[in-house]
Image: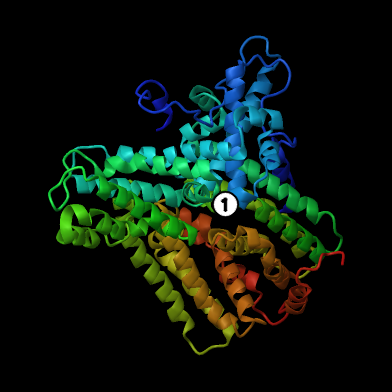
């Protein structure tokens, strides 16, 4: 690409970047004509957004009020007009975040299906919601424990919002008693204990995988061992709660075949007993030939996997890693350290994607880059050959 | 989902202050704002809201309802400025990327020698991404998850960085493929992408030596690349 384009591009991109220090959502000073109620709402919203961001960055205990008001663009006086203390603001934030997590959970629980099915769905929604919003997860299950007595008190009543999950009209325990209060309390306690432990251990994104185990323990008092074990077995795959999970699953089957073919061709081509630089070229040649000979499969691997869903993107990333590992092997002989061999291999694969993506996307086989263009980033030749 | 619960049916729950709600509209009547100012203010608030939401909870889980709530504008006003969620996301992406590109190129301009210029540029970029993990996630992860147009926008926007490597490619008369700069941008963005996807955006400045090696190798050769590794973190003017 000629570089004058980049300049123009840069100028075009830069337009509209605002420079000021104030938040764009701040209300301008002077006679703005807003009612006091509107101003108060805006201020509270900003304070809680700012608090959330600060808590995410350093944890509640380390957040000074000064940082919150600076980020929110409100005065100290205003802050204390809305909240008696930092703890009070946290409680408001906690309630807000919890409602965002629990409202969809309870909504998913509504319906006429069997209780155990509704519980499974609701739990999937809750775990998915937490996995998708680690900050909310932290606020609701970790920070709240260290935010003072008011927050703790609020927490014990707030968790009871989930009671209906275990007190549906038609639910009885395995022993036959209905609306078992102690069982409900125990179930909620168990759930929040597990969530706390997993989130604290940094496993928030893997929470959806725990659904089956949680279902086992949560349903045990109601369904008895046999019913609970069925939960463990039927849901063992690690719940993917995406609404289009079925589409994604069938895509993943096609993806698996295409990716295996791609990796197999590249790995096979490199196995020859050749000097390392030559092996890299042979692998890249095999990769480009795969793209040329099977443009549909190449498109599945490189392009489509991005747009199907999170599991497909994760698989694509995995394949990219495997591909890089194939190139890493010969590169180890050419690089000063293992680490740099790995970096170079990643650059090689990233450089391939950048140069070939468009042609693969359009199945424009004759526009695929050459082997030499793609390996240029790794500078394979010992010196200038020309 | 939660926004409709503001009408009735709420009386069972204790009345609490539900954040974050902002004034739905800019004031009517004599507010002294020009039409362009209103448009710009709304647009900017929407882009900020979208960038923050998509950069924290992900594009997929960000709804237009979330965005307009956070931005404090009506749904009607949203649709006046943007066709849909994806085009709003792309505009937010462009704004964030332009900011990152600008600070990268500004740092690039502060030095004389090409390798020093690259070091200053990459260092500025990595530090910015480390300071703003939300922007990092938006520009390197979520943009890949936001649909074909967003990916096309990303592929186009990343060309903005090629000037850094084209400057190096063109400074000597060796015959290097014209696609080299884009090839290098792709290689480096893969390395950066890895770190961010692994939740290590804050540690990005630590990969500066790796990136410098990758940047210098194809242009100046292996010896210069290894010198860059040895220089480690040292600043370009040290």
> Along the line of sight, which residue is nearer the eye, B39 or A42?
A42
Q: Is residue B29 above or below residue A180?
A: above
Q: Residue furthest bottom?
A: A273
Q: Could you tell me which chain the residue with mark 1 belongs to?
A: B
How far across and how far down the image is residue A267, in percent?
A: 45, 78
Taking the spot 48% from the left edge, 81% from the top edge, the residue there is: A270
Closer-to-camera residue (B203/A262):
B203
Residue denoted by label 1? B137
For the question of whether residue A343 can be seen, the reply is: yes
Q: Residue B56: percent from the left, percent from the top?
A: 54, 47
Q: In the current view of this chain or complex, which residue is farthest to the left?
A: A176
- In the picture, measured across the screen, residue B61 lies left or right of residue A108, that is right
Which corner quadrant holds the N terminus of chain A? bottom right
Write the residue at 69% across / 54% down. Answer: B161
Q: Residue at x 57, y 73 (%)?
A: A345
Label 1 environment density (alpha carbons within 10 Å; few <14, some 14–19, many ≥20) = many
Look at the numbered disc 1 and give the secondary structure of its residue: helix
Q: Position of residue B47 (x, y in %)?
A: 59, 36
Res. B90 visible in picture: no
Q: Residue furthest top?
A: B29
Q: Where the C terminus of chain A falls, by quadrant?
A: bottom right
Q: How many marks?
A: 1
Q: Position of residue A372 (x, y in %)?
A: 60, 71
């Amino acid at each position: 690409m000629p570089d004058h384009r980049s300049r123009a591009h840069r100028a075009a991109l830069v337009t509209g970047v605002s420079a000021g220090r104030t938040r764009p959502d701040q209300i301008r000073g002077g006679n703005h004509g807003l009612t006091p109620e509107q101003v108060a709402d805006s201020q509270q919203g900003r304070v809680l957004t700012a608090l959330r961001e600060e808590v995410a960055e350093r944890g509640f205990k380390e957040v000074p009020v000064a940082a919150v008001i600076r980020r929110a663009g409100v005065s100290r006086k205003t802050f204390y007009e809305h909240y008696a203390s930092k703890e009070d603001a946290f409680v408001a934030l906690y309630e807000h975040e919890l409602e965002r997590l629990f409202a969809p959970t309870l909504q998913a629980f509504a319906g006429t299906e069997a209780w155990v099915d509704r519980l499974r769905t609701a739990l999937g929604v809750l775990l998915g919601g937490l996995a998708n919003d680690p900050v909310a997860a932290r606020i609701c299950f970790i920070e709240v424990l260290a935010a003072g007595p008011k927050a703790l008190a609020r927490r014990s009543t707030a968790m009871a919002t989930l009671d209906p999950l275990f007190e549906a009209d038609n639910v009885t325990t395995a022993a036959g008693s209905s609306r078992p209060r102690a069982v409900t309390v125990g179930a909620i306690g168990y759930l929040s204990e597990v969530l706390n432990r997993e989130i604290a251990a940094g496993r928030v994104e893997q929470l959806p995988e725990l659904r089956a185990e949680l279902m086992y323990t949560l349903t045990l008092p109601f369904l008895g061992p046999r019913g609970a074990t069925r939960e463990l077995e039927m849901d063992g795959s690690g719940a993917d709660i995406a609404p289009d999970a079925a589409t994604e699953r069938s895509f993943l089957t096609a993806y698996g075949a295409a990716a295996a073919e791609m990796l197999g061709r590249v790995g096979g081509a490199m196995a020859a007993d050749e000097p390392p630089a030559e092996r890299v070229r042979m692998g890249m040649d095999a990769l480009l030939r795969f793209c040329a000979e099977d443009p549909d499969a190449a498109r599945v691997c490189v392009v489509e996997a991005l747009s199907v869903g999170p599991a497909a993107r994760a698989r694509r990333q995995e394949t990219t890693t495997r591909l890089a590992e194939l190139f890493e092997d010969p590169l180890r002989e050419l690089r000063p350290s293992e680490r740099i061999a790995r970096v170079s291999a990643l650059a090689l694969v990233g450089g391939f994607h950048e140069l070939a993506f468009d042609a693969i996307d359009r199945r424009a086989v004759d526009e695929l880059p050459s082997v030499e263009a793609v390996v240029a980033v790794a500078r394979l030749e010992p010196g200038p050959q020309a | 989902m939660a926004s409709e619960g503001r009408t009735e049916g709420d009386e069972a729950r204790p009345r609490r202050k539900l954040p974050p709600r902002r004034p739905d509209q800019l004031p009517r009547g004599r507010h002294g704002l020009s039409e362009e100012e209103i448009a710009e203010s709304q647009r900017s608030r929407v882009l900020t809201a979208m960038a923050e939401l998509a950069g924290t909870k992900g594009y997929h889980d960000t709804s237009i309802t979330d965005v307009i709530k956070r931005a404090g504008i009506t749904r009607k006003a949203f649709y006046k400025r943007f066709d849909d969620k994806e085009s709003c996301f792309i505009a937010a992406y462009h704004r964030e990327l332009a900011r990152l590109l600008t600070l990268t190129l500004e740092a690039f301009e502060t030095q004389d020698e090409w390798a020093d210029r690259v070091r200053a540029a990459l260092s500025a970029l990595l530090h910015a991404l480390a300071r703003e993990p939300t922007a990092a996630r938006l520009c390197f992860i979520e943009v890949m998850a936001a649909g074909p147009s967003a990916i096309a926008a990303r592929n186009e926007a990343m060309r903005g960085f090629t000037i850094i490597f084209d400057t190096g490619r063109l400074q000597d008369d060796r015959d290097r493929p014209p696609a080299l700069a884009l090839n290098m941008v792709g290689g480096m963005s893969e390395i950066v992408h890895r770190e961010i996807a692994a939740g290590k955006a804050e540690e990005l400045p630590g990969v500066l030596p790796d990136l410098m090696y990758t940047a210098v190798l194809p242009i100046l050769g292996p010896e210069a690349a290894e010198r860059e590794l040895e220089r480690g973190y040292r600043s370009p003017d040290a």
